[in-house]
Image: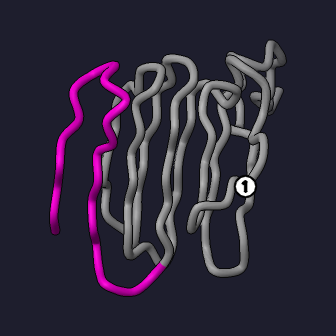
Amino acid sequence: MALTAAQPNSGVESSITISADGMAVQVVASEATWVSMTANGKQIFSGILEPNQRKLISGVARAKLVVGNAGGIEILTDGKSIGPIGPSGQVRVVILSPDGPQILRKAKSPSESGSNTTSSTD
């Protein structure tokens, strides 16, 4: 696995190659955004991308991204944008595979939803 680190706010891309086969996944931040990236079943990155920072992962068969600020990043596969994944401040889970991208909303916990979902056996 090759790894080239970027300096924060430099606009320089961090690049990771997993294998010779598969798609290239690039994440570009326009706002500070927490991102967790898993590719081919392995944790690749977890942290905050600052504006103009980029992560490029090559050789991806399948990837999962958990994004803390959906409006703060753009995701590209093989150089093509997958389009908006959600508004600023929203959490999204993005699954990337040869079948195309899937964008899921992060499930809220019962305490976040404001409703009591516990059952009672009175």
Quarter of the image with the C terminus is top right
The answer to whether 77 appears left or right of 99 in the picture is left
Q: Magenta region: which residues?
A: 1-22
Vertical arrangement, residue 38 with respect to residue 20, above or below: above
Picture residue at 67% right of the left edge, 39% below the top: 92
Q: Nearer the viewer, residue 109 or 11?
A: 11
The percent position of residue 13, horizontal first and vertical second, equals 33, 42
Residue 71, quarter of the rendered image? top right
Picture residue at 31% right of the left edge, 55% below the top: 43
Question: Is 16 a magenta residue?
Answer: yes
The answer to whether 30 appears left or right of 57 in the picture is right
Q: Nearer the viewer, residue 109 or 13?
A: 13
Quarter of the image with the N terminus is bottom left
Main secondary-structure element of the magenta-colored stretch: loop
The answer to whether 4 appears left or right of 121 in the picture is left
The percent position of residue 10, horizontal first and vertical second, equals 30, 24
Q: Amino acid at mark 1?
A: Ile
Picture residue at 75% right of the left edge, 41% below the top: 85
Picture residue at 60% right of the left edge, 33% below the top: 73
The answer to whether 27 appears left or right of 96 in the picture is left
Residue 41, quarter of the rendered image? bottom left
The percent position of residue 120, horizontal first and vertical second, equals 79, 28
Question: Is 6 a magenta residue?
Answer: yes
Q: How many marks overall?
A: 1
Vertical arrangement, residue 24 with respect to residue 20, above or below: above
Q: Nearer the viewer, residue 62 or 58?
A: 58
In the picture of the structure, the residue carrying the numbered disc 1 is 82
Which color scheme does this rendered protein use?
one colour
The percent position of residue 48, horizontal first and vertical second, equals 39, 25
Looking at the image, the residue that sits furthest to the bottom is 21
| Secondary structure type for disc 1 | loop
Q: Residues within 10 Å of mark 1 (few under 14, many from 20)?
A: some
